[in-house]
Image: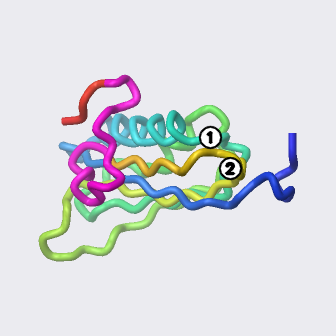
Amino acid sequence: MNSLGDSGWRLRAIRGATTVTNNTVEAVRSAVDELLDALEAHNAVDPDQIVSVTFSVTPDIDAVFPAKIARQRSGWDTVPLLDVQHMQVEGSLSHCIRLLMHVYIPAIAPSVHHPYLRGASNLRPDWASSLSVSGHRQE
């Protein structure tokens, strides 16, 4: 296997977003896990290759840090994670969790998939996922 510094790897940024219906630990956990499952299922992402992940949440989400949930995933306990509050803009999508991941992926990997799930699919219709990881349509 090539080291990350070899020319066989590229540093890429992956974006994604989802929404929650309630500001509860369970709802946030479900949404974050679904978002990260979709990200991993559609991209060649190994936690050892992740440089960092920043989660931003709208001000109406404060039940739990998304990074706390991500840190509980296998291999994610050493990934640098950061939570921030997303800028409040009048009329913007509420109950939204966004992420920005910087990751080394193989240069020969197909194009990067940016998962936009649930209500967040309206933010980037060109990147929206119409199917979840399990193959069911998003609500």
Describe the element under mark 1 as helix, strand or loop: loop
Contact flag, marks 2 and 1 (Cβ < 8 Å): yes
Residue that numbered label 2 is attached to: 105
Residue 126, percent from left and from top: 32, 55
Residue at 33% of width from left, 42% of height from top? 129
Residue 88, percent from left and from top: 24, 74
Residue at 50% of width from left, 46% of height from top? 68
Residue that numbered label 1 is attached to: 44
Q: Amino acid at mark 2?
A: Ile
Residue at 67% of width from left, 58% of height from top? 51
Q: Quadrant of residue 40?
A: top right
Q: Tell me if 41 is positioned left or right of 87 in this view.
A: right
Residue 73, percent from left and from top: 57, 35
When the figure is inspected, residue 35 is found, relative to residue 80, above or below; the finding is above
Q: Which residues are magenta?
A: 117-135
Crowd rating for badge 2 (residues with CA inside 10 Å; few <14, some 14–19, many 20+): many
Q: Amino acid at mark 1?
A: Ala
Image quadrant containing the N terminus: top right
Q: Main secondary structure of the magenta part?
A: loop
Whichever of callouts 2 and 1 sits on the residue coming sooner in the sequence is 1
Q: Tell me if 49 is positioned left or right of 26 in this view.
A: right
Tell whether position 54 is magenta.
no
Crowd rating for badge 1 (residues with CA inside 10 Å; few <14, some 14–19, many 20+): some
When the figure is inspected, residue 74 is found, relative to residue 18, above or below; the finding is above
Residue 79, percent from left and from top: 65, 50
Give how far apart the Cα atoms at labels 2 and 1 are: 6 Å
Image quadrant containing the C terminus: top left
Chosen colour scheme: rainbow
When the figure is inspected, residue 86 is found, relative to residue 115, above or below; the finding is below
Residue at 34% of width from left, 40% of height from top? 31
